Image (spheres, rainbow, N blue to C red):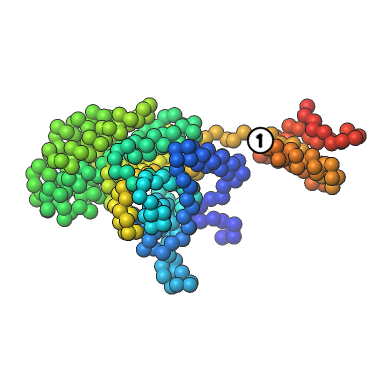
Amino acid sequence: MPNWLLPENIADVLPSEARKIEELRRVLLDNFRCYGYELVMPPMLEYIESLLTGAGQDMDLRTFKLVDQISGRTMGVRADMTTQVARIDAHLLNRQSVTRLCYAGSVLHTRPSGLHATREPLQIGGEIYGHAGLEADAEIQELVLASLALANISEVRLDLCHVGVLWALLDSDPVAKRQETEIFGLLQAKDVPALKELTKDFQPIVRQALLDLPNLYGDKAIIQKAREILPKLDGIAIALDELAYLVDLAGSAKVTVDLADLRGYHYHSGVMFNAFVPGLPNAVARGGRYDHVGEAFGRARPATGFSLDLRELARLMPLAERKDAVLAPWSQDPALRKKIMELRQSGHVVIQNLPGHENEQDEFACTSTIEFDGSQWILKTVG
């Protein structure tokens, strides 16, 4: 096997693509700051007990694990940064007021999350802590759509769900509650025949509601249909009210409601969403409310947020245009070096042509040169 061969679903990012990703990262972080989000930088490695707190079994399976040579304890390479940011809010910042935090960095997955997906996503996201109201969820939804707009993506579909619907059904039937894990799996797969078999001993009203959930998918009208056919439980009514509120705030985005799309069910505590865009088979952004995660870090805080993969998002963007640059000869002349320094300080890209080499910069278009006119070094436009 060649020693340059990389593992499956792991790849280098070459200059033109790297520049697209980095420019997008800067634009998104600057926009987050305009909303009041403070940047944090969690570590790549943590003890596994902290890293996987409240993250669910799915995240455990996606996390690379290793033994710390210093402490002998098991550590994990982060597969997601959300719980790390929740730990920072709960344990390190310890603020009582609303806190907005954002982050950007690589994560590592044991397996790709979808078709053609990388195992090393570059994750960027924002989280709000300390406000339990829907206003925080609405702000996160707005920030997701604004982020995609900054990437020049206008066709966005938001898929919304709410864990409160299933919670309310399970809490009303002790027999069903004991089968929670199996029910979750079958709803996620929309396996109605298997669901019929599993639920045959449940309360009739709960059984019928569970069988109805896979078909409760569509536009805003699905919320009204769910009000009509699902049991009149307080938890279900609240969940549907919250979904209706957020659907109305989605603006120009196409919104679908899928009451059986329970990805992240064991992690989230309220509204969940996935954002899909043309050209990508997987969700480009995911998010929702996760109020209970901070409890394990000593302080329960209302929390909602989202994250997206910059590498996936950048794939949809056109190739970055070549940047204008200035070509300068190689010389130790102090006057030339001063001219180059002045141009660089003013924001110009200046490339010095090393002796014996022609300029072959793929990333830059040298539209100007620095030439000596007999008395001084001057900037001259090419052509």
Pick the quarter of the image with the C terminus: top right
* Residue 291 visible in the picture: yes
Q: Is residue 72 above or below residue 148?
A: below
Q: Is residue 298 left or right of residue 3?
A: left
Q: Residues within 10 Å of mark 1 (few under 14, many from 20)?
A: few
Where residue 82 appears, as percent x and y from the top left, is: 39, 51
The structure residue drawn at horizontal position 22% and vertical position 39%, both measured from the top left corner, is: 239
Amino acid type, mark 1: Lys
Please identify the quarter of the rendering in which residue 76 is found: bottom left
Where residue 278 appears, as percent x and y from the top left, is: 42, 33
Q: Is residue 261 left or right of residue 117?
A: left
Q: Give the residue at the far right of this rendering.
A: 374
Please identify the quarter of the rendering in which residue 206 is found: top left
Where residue 277 appears, as percent x and y from the top left, is: 41, 34
Residue underneath mark 1: 323
The structure residue drawn at horizontal position 45% and vertical position 43%, both measured from the top left corner, is: 37
